[in-house]
Image: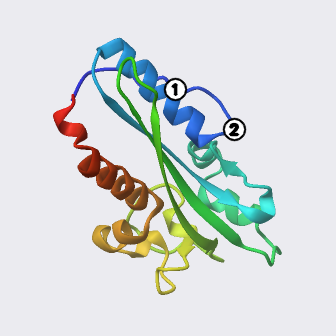
Amino acid sequence: MANCEKVEIQADSLERIAEHAAASAAAKLGCPVVAEDSGLFIKSLGGFPGPYSSYAFKTIGCSGILKLMGGVSDRRAAFRCSIAYAVPGNPTLLFAGEALGFISDSAKGTRGFGFDPIFISNEGRGLTFAEMDAEAKGRISHRGKAFRSFGEWCIRSECSTKT
């Protein structure tokens, strides 16, 4: 693990944020780098907080999102993850993962982080991400899906032997 501060640009695209972070770190360090960015996209809020999820969580938290959702019947949401793999001198590759679900009526659970207590995955048997253990969440989460996609590509391309 290298000591390099992540350069996170402000953009409306998870892909662009992850790609810039990975490419700038790879250029600085002179070696392959993986960077990740994730966000919660709420349909009835026009995709908010999306790529601004970290800031939204720090400023309004789960309770603020629940207030914004008060009286809203369409509670569909998706957690999305973009992983960028950059090798100096090569195009940056992107891998994505998505967990579809909805925003709960109240925060539930103590595990995970961020908006996990208010997100119920369609694959999660009615539990919020914060109510699931790490293994169960990892099987269905946006981040787990994206990293599995990257890992499968890495195995197929033998990326570890090319660096």
Question: What SS does tag 1 mark?
Answer: helix
Question: What SS does tag 2 mark?
Answer: loop
Query: How many numbered circles are shown?
Result: 2
The percent coordinates of residue 97 (x first, y second) are 49, 57
Crowding around mark 1 (Cα neighbors within 10 Å: few <14, some 14 to 19, many 20+) is some
The residue indicated by pointer 2 is: 12
Left or right relative to 134: residue 97? right
Residue under the point 48% across and 23% down: 7
Q: Residue 114, relative to residue 118: is it above or below?
A: above
The amino acid on which the numbered mark 1 sits, given as a three-letter code, is: His
Which is more toward the observer, 68 or 138? Answer: 138
Crowding around mark 2 (Cα neighbors within 10 Å: few <14, some 14 to 19, many 20+) is few
The residue indicated by pointer 1 is: 20
The amino acid on which the numbered mark 2 sits, given as a three-letter code, is: Asp
Which is more toward the observer, 31 or 133? Answer: 31
Left or right relative to 46: residue 158? left
The percent coordinates of residue 143 (x first, y second) are 42, 56
Residue under the point 42% across and 55% down: 146
The percent coordinates of residue 81 (x first, y second) are 50, 51
